[in-house]
Amino acid sequence: MKKYKNALISVFDKNKLDQIAHYLIKKKYTIYSTGGSSQYLKKIHVPHIEITKYTKQKEILGGRVKTLHPKIFGGILATNSKNHQSELNKEKIINFDLIIVNLYPFEETIKNSTKKDEIIEMIDIGGHSLIRAAVKNYLKTTVIIDPLDYSNFIKNSPKTDSAKKKYAIKAMEQITKYDIAITNWFQGNENEIYPLRYGENPQQKANALIRKNIFKQLCGEKKLSYNNLLDLDAAVSISYSTNSKKHICTIVKHNTPCGASIGNSQAKSYENALDGDPISAFGGIVAFNKRVSTLTAKKLIGNYYEVIAAPDYDIEALNILKKKKNLRVLKVKKFKTRIEQRSIFAGTLIQDANNKKSKVKKIFGVNKLNIEKFEFFINVLKNIKSNAIALFDQSSLISQSGGQTSRVDSLENCLYKFKIRQKKKKKTRLFLFSDAFFPFIDSLKLIKNEKLNIDVYAPVGSKNDPHIINFVKENKINFFEISDRHFKH
Amino acid sequence: MKKYKNALISVFDKNKLDQIAHYLIKKKYTIYSTGGSSQYLKKIHVPHIEITKYTKQKEILGGRVKTLHPKIFGGILATNSKNHQSELNKEKIINFDLIIVNLYPFEETIKNSTKKDEIIEMIDIGGHSLIRAAVKNYLKTTVIIDPLDYSNFIKNSPKTDSAKKKYAIKAMEQITKYDIAITNWFQGNENEIYPLRYGENPQQKANALIRKNIFKQLCGEKKLSYNNLLDLDAAVSISYSTNSKKHICTIVKHNTPCGASIGNSQAKSYENALDGDPISAFGGIVAFNKRVSTLTAKKLIGNYYEVIAAPDYDIEALNILKKKKNLRVLKVKKFKTRIEQRSIFAGTLIQDANNKKSKVKKIFGVNKLNIEKFEFFINVLKNIKSNAIALFDQSSLISQSGGQTSRVDSLENCLYKFKIRQKKKKKTRLFLFSDAFFPFIDSLKLIKNEKLNIDVYAPVGSKNDPHIINFVKENKINFFEISDRHFKH
C-alpha cells in the first residue's frame, strides 16, 4: 500500500489555490508545481517541489514546453497494475494521484483581442494534454480543473469509481468546449454568446451562439429575443436567397411568411407584402434584400414592427426608423446556411440546408412565370411549415397555409383566407404552390370548383399521379411540376 | 536558411503511408518515427530515425507514453523566431516541419466493443497532443492527419499561410469531433450514427446522432427516415410526457398531433385518437404510453401507419403487427429532453426544453377538467405549431390548427374542421386550448357565435386582457387561465 500521495499543480487561474494547497499539505500530499503556480505557492508558504527539479528539464520557449515530459505523463498515465508500477520504479517516475490544472483563457482572449499572435499564444497545449491524460486514467489520477470544485474535493475526496468519474467527465466536457472555441476561431466562425432573456417561452432558459458580425443592430433599445431570431431566420432566408436585381420584401410572423413580394420598386414591394396579410404583419419582422430607401422607411413607420432587416440603409431612412424607440433595425450580412441541426428526443438530426434550386416542368398549359419569380415563390414556399400551400399573384404572396396534418386542409384554408380577404383579386391570374405532391384528386377538385384563374405548381411522385395528370388535362387546369419536394417541419 | 527538413510520422492508420514516405525521402526530409509506424517504414525500406534514438527515452507503459517529450514538442512548438531557435540549438532539439499523425480509432472501438478497458485504451493522448501542438504552430509545422490528404500535399505542398492554415483547420475539426465522441461516451450518451437516406427532402443529405438503445426496432424492414424521427419526437413527447396511469395514444402526421386521447382502455384511446382526424392519420406515427395489447394491435392493423412506438408489446400483439412488412414497430425507452438546439442563419439557438408543468386558474366558470386531463391537453397543445389552437372533448383531440400567422385564423380553421367533420359532437362539452393569449376580442366573438358548449383555456398577458375578461364574463364564456405560454415554431 502506498503511503504518500503526489499532486501536480499547474494553473492559470490562481483563485482559491491557497485553500486546496493547504488542504493537500495537511493530508500529507507532496506537491509538484510549474512556473507561475510555483511562485504563487512560494508566496503563500506552501512547501512544494518545482517540476523542473523533478524532470531535470527547464521550461523552454517562453513557457510553451513546461510539462510535456515522460516523467510527468508516465506518472499520470500509469495504472496501478504491476507492470506499469514496476516500469515507473525502473524509470524513477513517481505516481501522480491528483492533478490540478486549468487552461490559458482562450475564449476570454478572443473576446478582448483581435491580435492573432496573442490569441494563438493562448491555445493551451501542455495543460490540455495533462488533463486528457488524467481523464484517460481517471481511476488512478483525479483531475480538478475548476477552482469551484476545490471545496467539494476537500469535503468529499472521491473514493468510489463513480465519484472519480465525475471529475473526469467535467474535465472532458470543459476541454471539449475549449477546443470547439478554437476550431470555430480557426474556421473564422467566431461565435459570440448572444444573451437571451428566455427561450421560445418565458419558462425556458436560453442562449444563442451567433457568428460575430453577421448582423449589427443599428438602433432600437432592446436586444433581439429568441423568437425574433427565429423569425429573422425565415425572413432573411427568403429575402436573401436570390441574386435577383429586383427588390424583395418579406414579412414574417411566427416563423412563417405572411407577406412576400418581388418587384422593381422597394416601396411598392413592401406595400404588396403588407397587403398579403396586414393583420398578421402587425408586430412582425420585415426583411429587404437591398439598401432601404427613405421612401420605404416612411412607409414602414406607418405600421408596428419588431424588427427591420436589410443589407444597408440610406442615412435619411435610418434617421426615420430611429424615431421608433422600440423598433430594432438590423444590418444583416449575406450568408449561406449549409448545415442544419435540430434536437429530437433521441439525439440530433443533422442535414444539409435545402439550398437546391428547383426546376419547373410543364404538365399541362403554358408556364407564365419567369425563372426569377418561380425561384422566389419557391423560396417563400420553403419557409411555410408543411403541409404548405402558398398562393401568389404576379408578384406577391396573397394567401398561405401550413402546419396542417393534411394537404387538402391546408389548401382549403389557403383558398378560404384568399376569398374572404382578397376579393378584388378574383379576376387576376393566380399561382398556387404546394410543397409536396397531391396524394389524391380531392385537392384539384377544390381548385377547379373555385372557378378562379389558378395555375398549379407542385411536385409529382404519388401513386395517384396518373389520375391527377388525367384530371388536370381533362379539366384544363394549368399544372406544372416542381422538381423537388420542399418540406419544412 | 534551413536546408534540411524533418518530418515526424506516428500513425495508427498505415493506409497510403508508403506514398507519402517515399515522397518525403525524395524531397530530402529526415523522417523520425514511433513504434508501429517505424516497423512499417522498415518493412517498406524507408530510411528513418526511431524517435527513441532521438529522445533517448524508451516507450513506456505499453505505448501510453511514446512522444510526450520536450525534444519532440519543442521541435513542433518552436517558431522561427531567433529566441526560440537559439533555445532549440542549446537544448539540441531539432525543428519538425511536418508531422503526420492520426489517432487510435476511438469511435470505431465504441461501436464494436463494450469492454471499458479496451475503449479507454483507445483514448489517444500522445498523438492528440502532437496534433494540437502543430495546430498552434501551424505556420512552421504542418500537420496531416488524413491519408486522403497525402496526394494533395505531394501535388501542392503548402507554401502560403492560408494553405498551411487549411491543414490546421482540418486537424482541429477532426480532433474536436474525436473529443466530442469521448465526452459523450463518458457522459453515458453513447451516440451512434443512424444512417439516413436523406433529410427532410431527398435533395438534402442527412445524418442522425442517436443515443444508443433509446429505441429498438422490433420489426419492419426499412429503417426510419428523417421525417419519421421528427414525427416520432412529437408522438412520444406527447404520449410519454406524463406519469398518468391512464392509457394515452397519440397519432402524428407532419410533426403535428392529428389525434390524441387519454382513457382507461388502450384500444378505445386508439380509436378515439384515430377518430380525431382519420384522413390525416393515414401514413402517420402512433405512440402509446403503455405496453401494447393484442386487442390494440388488432385494431392498429386496420389502418396504414409508418411507425408504431410504445414502451413494450404483448408477444401476441407483436406477432400481429409483424405481419405488416412495411410497418416499423419500435420499443422506445422513457426519456427526458433537457436541452434543445436549433440552427438559424446566424448560428445556433439553445434552450431548455419546455418541461414546466402549467397550472390552471379560473377566470370565469367552473373548471371541469381534472389535473391529469389538463396536463395531457397541454402536452398535446405544446406539440402543435404556433399559433396553436386545439379542441378537445372529454378525453380526446377532435380538431386542431397551427402554423398560422394569426391566432384568429388558427381558431377559425380549428372550428371549421370541427364543424364539418365532427357534427355528432356538437352537443357535448368541448375544451378549447390556445398556446398564447388572445390579443383581441375577435376570437372570443367567434367562439361565442358558434353557439357550442366550449370552455376556453388560454394564457393571459395582453394589453387587452381587461376587455377580454369583461367579454367572457358578460357572455358567460367559461374561461380559464393557463399559467404559461407554449409556443412551438
Image (spheres, coloured by chain):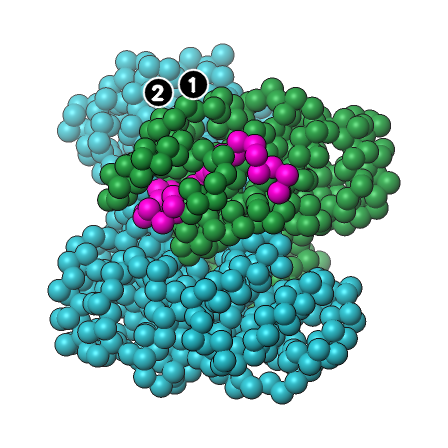
Chain colours: A cyan, B green
Residue underneath mark 2: A153
- Where residue A141 appears, as percent x and y from the top left, is 45, 27
Q: Nearest the camera: B17 or A309?
A: A309
Label 2: how many Cα within 10 Å (few below 14, some 14–19, many 20+): some
For mark 1, name the chain.
A
Separation of disc 2 and disc 1 at Cα? Answer: 7 Å
| Circle 2: element type | helix
- The residue segment tinted magenta is B422-445
Q: Quadrant of residue B470?
A: top left
Going from N to C along the chain, the mark reached first, 2 or 1, is 2
Q: Is residue A223 left or right of residue A229?
A: left
Q: Amino acid at mark 1?
A: Pro
Q: Is residue A42 magenta?
A: no
Direction from residue A319 to residue B471 in the image, left or right: right
Kind of residue sitting beneath label 2: Phe
Q: Name the image quarter holding residue A76.
A: top left
- Which percent across, then down, holds residue A90? 51, 29
Residue B257 in the image, given as x and y percentages of width and height? 58, 43
The residue that disc 1 covers is: A158
Which quarter of the rendering shows the N terminus of chain B? bottom left
Q: Kindly identify the residue that appears in the image at 49 percent across and 67 percent down.
A: A419
Which residue occupies 17% across, 23% down? Answer: A45
